[in-house]
């Protein structure tokens, strides 16, 4: 059977894991079963065309799941990927003359809105740890990590690789090196300037001067895991937050900027995005916030309001 040949090819020539091969098997057999239930006279794979595949997609989206509610777009696209790989293999082996999948596109997956901390919750969180820096070097460093990620929107990797030479206290700006070694300048406010200056003084006195801005007590560059652990621990103090990671602070920075009137292009440059498409996800978040604010209006709660029920 052609399916068995294809699966052997994946396992022995492409070195796919058994779990991956098994996933391909399930997807292909599911499609074959659909064809048999649709028309038992259909010959697989010769009679398969784009319309048949599209009808299969529709059936998966409508009632394909175990609960009868249908598969999500991500699951359907994974199944389509298995089918596309199979027909690509058949074309390579010259078993078919035309690839029916070339005209098939999968459903667009709905991108989830980014998790973020609301302004008031973030202010309370930062204020509650304002005196941590007076305790010891670790407390001061950890407090600054959270503050800097939220105040600048930089990525975790950018913070880890930050050097002393990248911080310009006179111009009050930080030079960060982002993806594909692309550099950008991020301004900072007086509060962050004071926290950074205090941290450097304590760091140099207790640990010693360093090339990297954030270091461990042994003088080595701080690790990605430590930053994640610090942020996760701090964000756990926000009980309503479903996800807790350094990227949530980046999301919070961008959302706060837009909600408070910043232009989209300016936020794009601050985040280091190559295009507005990556930044525009935060406009959806901001719009959701605006809808919540509107629904607080007594007229919005009545049937027949602008948004209805």
Image (tube, rainbow, N blue to C red):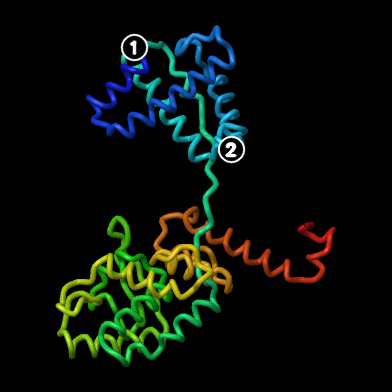
Q: Which residue is at a point 26% across and 27% down the rendered structure image?
A: 11
Q: Mark 2 points at which residue?
A: 67
* First reached walking from the N terminus: tag 2 or tag 1: 2
- Left or right of 16: which side holds 243? right
Where residue 142 sits, quadrant-wise, is: bottom left
In this orientation, which residue lies closer to the viewer: 8 or 220? 8
| Residue at 53% across, 10% down | 42
In this view of the protein, which residue sits in the foreground, 65 or 301? 65
Label 2, label 1: how far apart the Cα atoms are: 39 Å
Specify few, some or many for label 2: CA neighbours under 10 Å numbering under 14, 14-19, or 20 or more: few
Mark 1 element type: loop
Which mark lies nearer to you, 2 or 1? Answer: 2
Q: In this rendered view, identify the residue nearer to me: 89 or 186.
A: 89
The answer to which image quadrant residue 199 occupies is bottom left
Q: Position of residue 131 (x, y in %)?
A: 38, 91
User: Which residue is rendered at x = 34% and y = 76% of the image?
Assistant: 145
Numbered badge on residue 126: none
The image quarter in which residue 57 lies = top right
According to the picture, the residue beneath numbered tag 1 turns out to be 94
Residue 80 x %, y %: 46, 30
The quadrant of the image that shows the N terminus is top left
Badges 2 and 1: C-beta atoms under 8 Å apart? no
């Amino acid at each position: 059977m052609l399916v068995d040949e294809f699966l052997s090819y994946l396992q022995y020539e492409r070195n796919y894991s058994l779990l991956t091969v098994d996933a391909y098997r399930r997807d292909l057999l599911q499609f074959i079963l659909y064809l048999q239930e649709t028309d038992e006279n259909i010959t697989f794979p010769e009679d398969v065309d784009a319309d048949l595949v599209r009808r299969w997609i529709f059936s998966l989206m409508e009632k394909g799941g175990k609960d009868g509610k249908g598969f999500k777009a991500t699951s359907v696209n994974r199944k389509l990927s298995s089918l596309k790989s199979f027909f690509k293999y058949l074309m390579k082996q010259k078993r078919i003359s035309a690839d029916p999948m070339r005209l098939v596109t999968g459903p667009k997956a709905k991108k989830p809105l980014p998790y973020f901390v609301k302004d008031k919750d973030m202010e309370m969180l930062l204020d509650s740890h304002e005196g941590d820096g007076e305790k010891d070097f670790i407390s001061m460093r950890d407090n600054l990590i959270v503050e800097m990620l939220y105040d600048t929107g930089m990525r975790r990797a950018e913070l880890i690789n930050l050097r002393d030479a990248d911080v310009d206290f006179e111009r009050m700006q930080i030079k960060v090196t982002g993806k594909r070694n692309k550099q950008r300048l991020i301004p900072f406010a007086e509060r962050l300037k004071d926290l950074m200056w205090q941290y450097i003084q304590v760091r140099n006195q207790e640990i010693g001067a360093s090339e990297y801005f954030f270091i461990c007590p042994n003088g080595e560059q701080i690790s990605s895991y430590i930053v994640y652990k610090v942020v996760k621990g701090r964000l756990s103090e926000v009980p309503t937050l479903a996800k807790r990671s350094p990227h949530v602070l980046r999301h919070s920075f961008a959302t706060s900027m837009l909600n408070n009137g910043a232009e989209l292009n300016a936020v794009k440059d601050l985040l280091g995005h190559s295009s507005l498409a990556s930044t525009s996800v935060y406009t959806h978040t901001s719009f959701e916030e605006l809808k919540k604010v509107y629904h607080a209006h007594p007229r919005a709660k009545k049937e027949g309001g602008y948004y209805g029920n």
